[in-house]
Amino acid sequence: MIQPEDIVRNGPNQFISQKGIYHELDSLVSAFQSPAVVTGYDSIKLFHNTQICRLIGLSFSTKDTVHPMRSHSSQKNLKGSDVIIGIGGGTILDTAKSVADALQIEVIMVPTIPGTCAASTPLVIYDEKGNYMRVDYHKRSSYLTLINHTFLLSSPLSYFQSGIYDTLAKWYEAEAIIRNTKGALPLMVHAALKQAVYVRDILLSHSEEAVNSLKTGQFSQAFADVTDTIITLAGTVGGYGGRYGRMAGAHAVHNGLTFIEETHHLLHGQKVAYGILVQIAVENRMSEVEELLELYQTPRLPRNMRDLGITIQLKEASTTVANHAARKDETFCLIGDYAKEKIVDAIQIIEAFQPQKTI
């Protein structure tokens, strides 16, 4: 039986990355009769300022940020719509995708923050407390994904940096999965690895300039390239590679961290960045750990449990993370058969690690 992870997905059905494109949304949705918007207060206030709300026939389905687990109530309000337009950050976009999939209608993605690949990837479901639950795979890719770089220049810096490191994990996870898989692999899996290399190289060569662009509010091609990489190009790694290119140890550690309340203030990419360190330490690739620790210095990314906000009961916290990450239905197993004790050991190695270089 074909599993969702075995289906190649190319990304959005249509993708437009262009200055001022958000102002063209009314004409882009003109083929639909009953469009509806899933959004939140912050996003819609921003779009009021850009006059995007001159759209005719849109109904705002939420008064505040919608949690994906509440999507069933949203479905009732949105019945009769023929397209859902998600305007906002990752949670909003995930909600829009979930509702559209349940109603079996098209979805349009309008990201307001370059912090995730939610506009191009399957939906991750969390419970009301923010704990990881599962990944849902939708039948359709987005009908249309729009990116306006000049609009995104007003994004919070922390979200942009989080997006960079969540996207960097594409390389570390896909490379580890493919390297540790025996036997011949499909051609598209090799294409996924090539994409992961391309993604990594863009981020390592352009992220510093892109971050400076965001800080100054001055557009640069580096900002455009990194933004497009985070929002859309990153999704092609898992889209082409399926189970070989989506998530591995870093995201399994992230998912385990969601069960620790002290980490809930952190952004997704910040926890994934820490997960990369643990994944690499499990494989005893300590020279790469050292390189990343230097890279994590600016911006200040979590390099140990205290940086994650865990200052007491460190042993219990590492066990909680490892218990989840080592589950047979989690993605750490894609790079090897690592027992929870091995993952705990890797966490302790990161805690005690003293780089040879001064960082």
Image (tube, helix red, strand yellow):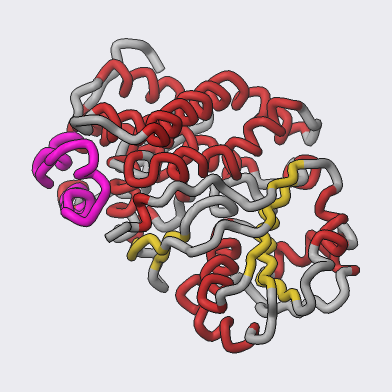
Res 141 quadrant in image: bottom right
Residue positioned most to the top = 357
Quadrant location of the C terminus in the rendered image: top left
The correct choice, above or below, for 21 with respect to 198 in the image is below
Q: Which of the two residues, 306 or 238, is positioned nearer the viewer here? A: 238
Q: Is residue 154 visible?
A: no
Q: How many marks?
A: 0
* Residue 220 spot, x, y in % from top left: 76, 27
Residue in the image at 65% along x and 46% along y: 156
Residue 280 shown left or right of residue 121 in the figure: left
Main SS class of the magenta portion in the image? helix
Residue span colored magenta? 317-346
Residue in the image at 79% along x and 60% along y: 46
Would residue 214 be counted in the magenta stretch? no
* Residue 272 spot, x, y in % from top left: 39, 42
Quadrant location of the N terminus in the rendered image: bottom left
Q: Is residue 38 visible?
A: yes
* Residue 292 spot, x, y in % from top left: 39, 24
Residue 16 shown left or right of residue 308 in the figure: right
Residue 149 shown left or right of residue 304 in the figure: right
Res 126 quadrant in image: bottom left
* Residue 84 spot, x, y in % from top left: 67, 71
Residue 287 shown left or right of residue 88 in the figure: left
The correct choice, above or below, for 313 with respect to 174 in the image is below
Q: Which of the two residues, 143 or 124, is positioned nearer the viewer here? A: 143
Would residue 326 be counted in the magenta stretch? yes
Res 348 quadrant in image: top left
Q: Which of the two residues, 137 or 210, is positioned nearer the viewer here? A: 137
